[in-house]
Amino acid sequence: MGSPPTDPDRWTVSAVSMPAVLHAEGVTVVDLRSPGEFAEDHLPGAHNRPLFDDQERALVGTLYKQSSPEAAFESARALVLESIDSLVTGVARAAGRETPAEDLPGLVRRLTEAGLEGTQRALRFDVHEELPAGALVVHCWRGGMRSASVARLLRELGWGDVFVLEGGYKSYRRRVMAELEGWQAPPSFVLRGMTGVGKTLVLRELEAQRPGWTLDLEGLAGHRSSILGMVGLEPCNQKTFDTRLAARLREGFPGPCVIEGESRKVGDSIVPPSVWGALRGGVHLRLHAPVERRVEVLIEDYLAREESRDELRRQLPFIEERLGRNAWRGELTARLDDGREAELVEILLERYYDPLYAHSERDYEYSAEIDSSDPVAAAAEIAAWIEARG
């Protein structure tokens, strides 16, 4: 198999800490994990250029567990030899660089000729706390062989500003959870009110009038936090929600934090204790609007896209079941199919959503009541009310 090169610098990989990456500007982050890993969650703005696809990753992992680390290494080496040209081309495009004209398979063979043991023995990490402008950061799951091998190869191609993310994605996930746990809320104000009063519309208008004041949990979760809350949206998983939320909290709040009232879960995403404390302990403002306006808001929100009708049709039987299987079977769906959307929404409000709201809100005291029929005017009134409190 040969011996490791005698030049130790060839095997030195520059690593960078997670805080340096999160606060750097103009840096390209390339996630080398499989597409499935990337889809579950990833660093904000990262580009996915997988070293292995999902099946290949599973194969290498199985060999590692059931055969030996050496067998997994040789399998991974063979797979990389087949895909290295497209991988480097993809990384170069993500970083806005020219694709090197090199014999990449030959370079892979040379860099891995020492086998697993020799490669691991020669590998050294030089950890940095700062990144130069325009740097390229590559990472895998743990900042191990996947990212270190690619970083070494890119260094051999003359890219001296390539860094490995210390600890890989796992370090990022730990960082996100620590940030969520340690967040200290500024003075918080919570918009509450019955379904359809336009809390989200008011929240977004407030953000336009007072940039940085709001925390849109439903926007981050891609869900309206109800049994029909996913219609017309793209709900995310817990890890992605955590990542989005941590990124927003990292930006900070130049003034107060204004949040829409939610339950402990927004869709399938659980609100962390620090944010839940702000929701429970903030100053509560009640928004109200006539039923006609609420019906209008919900129709515009849920049925803005034609394809949303099919999503809504699939969900309505769940509410029919809760209202009474025998009395309501097919009744709500029929109203949707007959074009009686306003009638459908009124029934949903009267028989399902309003009773739920009355039950869930019974313990809250409101410091102000605001007509939200005009979201722009309501947002201005809320901003003036908060600012008057000093």
Image: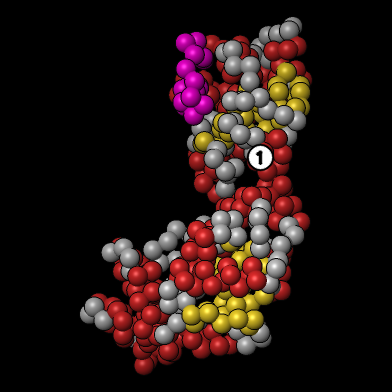
- Front-most of 81 and 27? 27
Residue drawn at (52%, 68%) of the image: 380
Residue type (three-letter) at the residue carrying disc 1: Leu
Give coordinates of residue 29: x percent, y percent.
58, 33
- Left-right relation of 74 to 83: right
- Left-right relation of 182 to 55: right
Which secondary structure, mark 1?
helix
Which quarter of the rendered picture does the N terminus lie within? top right
Residue drawn at (66%, 24%) of the image: 132
Which quarter of the rendered picture does the C terminus lie within? bottom right
Say if residue 138 shows up in the picture. Answer: no
Seen as rendered, the residue at the extreme left is 338
Give coordinates of residue 123: x percent, y percent.
74, 21
Look at the image and say whether residue 123 sits in the magenta stretch: no
Residue drawn at (40%, 67%) of the image: 231
Look at the image and say whether residue 90 sits in the magenta stretch: yes
Residue 181 position (above or below residue 41): below
Image quarter for residue 143?
A: top right
Seen as rendered, the residue at the extreme top is 6
Residue 154 position (above or below residue 178): above
Span shown in magenta:
88-105
Give coordinates of residue 180: x percent, y percent.
70, 56
- Which residue carries the number 1 mark? 22
Q: How is the image coloured?
A: secondary structure
Say if residue 313 shows up in the picture. Answer: yes
- Front-most of 140 and 302? 302
- Left-right relation of 85 to 3: left
Give coordinates of residue 130: x percent, y percent.
72, 29
Residue drawn at (51%, 46%) of the image: 39
Image quarter for residue 111?
A: top right
Residue 337 position (above or below residue 249): below
